[in-house]
Amino acid sequence: MKGLWTKLRRYPALLLLMVVYVISCGVVITNAIRAAGGAPGEKQKKVLRFAHWQLEPGIRSAVDQVMADYEEIHPDVEVRQILIPEEGYFRWVNTQLIGRTAPDMIQCGSGGVVGWALWPKFYARYFLALDRYVDQPNPYNKGTHFEDTSWRKTYFDEMEGGYDESLQSYFSVPLSTFTVRLYYNKDLIEEVWGPSFPATYLEFIELCEELVRYGEQAGRKLVPIAGSGYNFRQFFNAYRTAFTADYLDRLDADYDGTVTRVESAGPIYSGAVEMTEPSIRANFELVRELSEYFPQGYMALDRDEAVFLFLQGHSAMISTGSWDYKSLGVQSEFAIGVTDIPLPSKDNARYGRYMAGPQTEAGLKGGFRMAITKVSRNADVALDFLQYASSLERNQELNEAMYWLPVIEGAETREHLKPFAPRIEGFSPSIEYEGPGAELAYNQLLPAYMSGKIEYEEFAQQLVEAYRRESHRGVDEYIKNNEQTLDQQMRFAAMRRAILTGAKGASEAIAGDSEAQYKRIIEAYVGQLGTRNNEIRVWTENVRLLGHGEL
Amino acid sequence: MSRISEGPVARVLKHGYLWVMLALVFMPFYVMLVISFKDNAQFYNRPWVPTLPLHWENWSEAWNTVGVYIANSIFLAVTATLIALAAAILAAYVFGRYRVPFGQLFWLGLIILMLMPGVANLIPLFNLMRNLNLLNSLVGLAIVTAAGGQVFCLYVLRNFIEDMPKEFFECARIDGASHLQQVIHVVIPQCGGIISALAIMSFVGAWNSFILPLITIRDPELLPLAVGLYRLQGAYVKQWGPLMAAYFISAVPLVILFAFTMRFFIRGISEGAIKG
């Protein structure tokens, strides 16, 4: 032993490594024991894991508080957060689900267009349907006026946010909701413009001009609006709806009140709707006009770079959602105001005749949605935890702490968040410029147009050319994807039918009220089949209208 | 010529160049250190210069966050290195000393493994780990990391053992040494330099491994440093102070490692150069 020590003393690095390795082994073993729910012999705790991408300041501590409160009344349970950055979240979830190592609860909804197509498939395969629970009262509402009300009915949107249309089932539990507004630096606007924010679009443009002048006079670079690829999209969508709401009548071929991507892409492809039509052109021209007040190269900037500009005082305004209210407030050294994104009024000489009005938020649904995975060993406890977090009292507390909007009817909203209250009046989006297959071309051409590299005529012409080149393949894939969803619906319907006929083991499958569920899913199937047929008809007609091309 | 190169102007230029290089090298450390004492408001307003008050709590927060990651990375890197070297030394001894049936074929198979980019194996490897129940496990990750890392070690070590004088092994056998004893008493002392260099390379490789832990580890308390830092960095609203403190802390173990082991590394590499 002494000999070994004498040898080791000659190699201090090795000695150090051995010591830290032993310590590391201790840490790893301790964590492994904790992960299993406690040391052997101790009373094993049920460990719930809760994965989400809300890494903004204050969210983690607010969720921690709810978890601690829950653990206090359930000492045999330990709830843990797994925080994953949004940029890699969807891929992480995908991997965990495939690897059967998914946590008990997962926030749903990330992943952009790919995610939008894949989440229903994930729901069907990897998540528990919650239908049998949503029509029963939430036990944590005992003693409130919701004591006998079904869990679903306690939500402001009747839990629509947790409902998957294509599968006609409830799969997730929303905990908050969000709207998008324009944030501004109150101190700076007061100094440059006056105590109140501009009331009209023209005044808003004047304010932007004033800010540019003010920056030049002060010898510093001041960009009126902090933009990035992410923030721009929100800004653009507000104007798209305002300018093109009237297209509903022209594009809604099956009169169901919504315009699908193919209903929109078909007429653009054939030329039945031209990109040079005055209201569409006005839509793009107005946004380009406004983008003069964004930072140079803003489309290539990240979301956090826009926030950086705003918080450093290099920008006076930023367009983002209510989810940023607390993080912007905590990090800024100035007062922050919130207002609607300004739209031109009807009497605006240039744009007024095309204006319909603001985008409606009447169809707002719950967000921050948590679903329970089928691999969860403690699915019943996970459900209980989500019921706890979505009870009237807890949901109010949680959202107060996060500075977000609660989802439970009657839960109080913080005074500061009143400007984010959903706007009921307004119009729905009625045209989609990113048709199936043409997404890439659109996302390449738009920055070129916005930065002034190409003129509107060239933008419109190249976009239509891309539609004619790429849409056949794009629409084909789009319809195939939708058909996969139809297949899934049929499988769901079959499972419910099996429950109705009393098939062995079927009762463990999905819903409580299976007859109603079965009818609903068949109705949805018929509806979606109708949509599919309508989309094929629209596309065929537009291909014929153009007079060439193959299906 | 020598008078010009040793003149005062040359000295100033030489030292000036070295100082500039040194400043460039230490610039990231300066930035990390300065920002690590700021809150976000201080960072957004004056990012590059020290500001008061100093936020010491960033360091405790950073240590609480990355302390576990560092422990996990040390466990992963040391375990993977030990397994990789143990397997590689034994295999290299066999390939270097003995002719075995289909030995050349096995050897070519191993070399092909080395040519395969790791990312190309990712999906089959993930499936394999899932079927072996090794996902979300540091031990599983260490085994897979070692399996990937040992091929290079084997490739290098085989040539060294092949070039060793046969007399060493014959003497050992005459003294009654078994195969394992020959490895312990002949191979390891003779290849000490290159084994140290390979150990350092394996350690650094495992320490920096990213893709595999990213997809196979779920729980935050099991994450190695590279993925842990990525998750911190990937947050949309970053807490720059604790983040920079965490970066600083996480740079320390490798600095210590290289400070202590640089001479072994250089010796190992130069041994290779002479043999080559």
Image: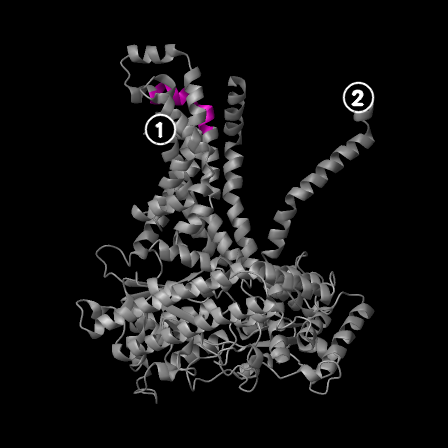
* Main SS category, magenta section: helix
Above or below, comparing residue B33 to residue A192 in the picture: above
Q: Nearer the viewer, residue A525 or A312?
A: A525
* SS assignment at label 2: helix
Whether the magenta-drawn stretch holds residue B195 is answered as yes
Which x, y percent locates residue A384? Answer: 30, 73
Residue B2: which disc?
2
Residue located 72% across and 41% down the image: B20
Q: Is residue B125 left or right of residue A402?
A: left
* SS assignment at label 1: helix
Above or below, comparing residue B225 to residue B187 in the picture: below
Disc 2 and disc 1: Cα gap in Å?
A: 52 Å
Q: Are marks 2 and 1 in contact (CB under 8 Å)?
A: no
Residue under pointer 1: A4
Q: Which residues are magenta?
A: B183-196
In the displayed orientation, state which residue is furthest to the bottom.
Answer: A145
Chain letter of the residue carrying label 1: A
Which x, y percent locates residue A161? Answer: 42, 75
